Image (spheres, rainbow, N blue to C red):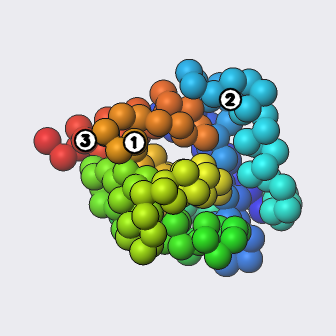
Amino acid sequence: MWTSVESPVGPLKIVAHQDAVTAIEFSGDPGPGVSPHTSASIAAARSAGRPVGERVDDDPLLAETARQLAAYFARDLKEFDLPVRPEGSDFQQRVWAQLQLIGYGETASYGEIARRLGMTNAASRAVGLANGRNPIPIVIPCHRVVGSNGTLTGYAGGLERKQLLLTLEQDALF
C-alpha cells in the first residue's frame, strides 16, 4: 500500500508493506545533478521487487509517516520513530544502520562510514553505492553523507534536494 504527500522537496510516495515503511520515493523533477534517464532508472530500481499495492491514504502507518515527515519539514521533528524495513544486501543493511546514527544537522563522509564499519577508506565507493540504493531517504538520512572534503556529492534525489535537506537541518539548529 502507498500514499503520496507534498513536501518542500516535491511529492513523496510513501510505501509500506505489512507493518513497516519499505520505501519513500521522490516524484517529479529531481533537480540538477540527475539526468532524466538516471532519474527514471532510480525510480525503477527503487520500485523493483517491492510490493506497492493500492493507494490507501488513511492507513495508520502511512498517515503517521506523513505526519512525521510534515513535522520534520516544519523543523519540529529531529528523529523519526517509524518501523522501517529497507530491502537490501547485508552490506547495504549495515551501511543504512550507520546512516541512522548520523545526528540531525550533522554529516559524515563516505570514508567515515567505511571506517565505522571496520573498513578502510578504499571502501568509500562501496559505501556510496549502498548509500545511493537507500530505499527510505529522509527517514534513513542518506542526505547527511558528504564527500571527504565536505562537498556535496551524488544524491539519488538530486543535489538540489540534498542541499535543501541539509540546509533545513542546519537552519533549524540556529
* Residue that mark 1 sits on: 147
What kind of element bears circle 1?
loop
Please determine whether, in this image, residue 151 is positioned above or below residue 121. Answer: above
Q: Which of label 1 and label 3 is nearer to you?
A: 1
Q: Earlier in the sequence, mark 1 or mark 2?
A: 2
In this view, the residue farthest toward the left is 174
Q: Which of marks 1 and 3 is nearer the N terminus?
A: 1
Q: Is residue 160 left or right of residue 15?
A: left
* Residue that mark 3 sits on: 170
Query: Which of these two is toward me, 92 or 16?
Result: 92
The image shows residue 102 at horizontal and vertical percentages of: 34, 61
The residue positioned 45% from the left and 46% from the top of the image is 143
The answer to whether any part of residue 76 appears in the image is no
Q: Earlier in the sequence, mark 3 or mark 2?
A: 2
The image shows residue 146 at horizontal and vertical percentages of: 39, 44
Checking the image for residue 110, the label placed there is: none
Kind of residue at disc 1: Gly
Kind of residue at disc 3: Gln
* Residue that mark 2 sits on: 28
The image shows residue 68 at horizontal and vertical percentages of: 45, 58
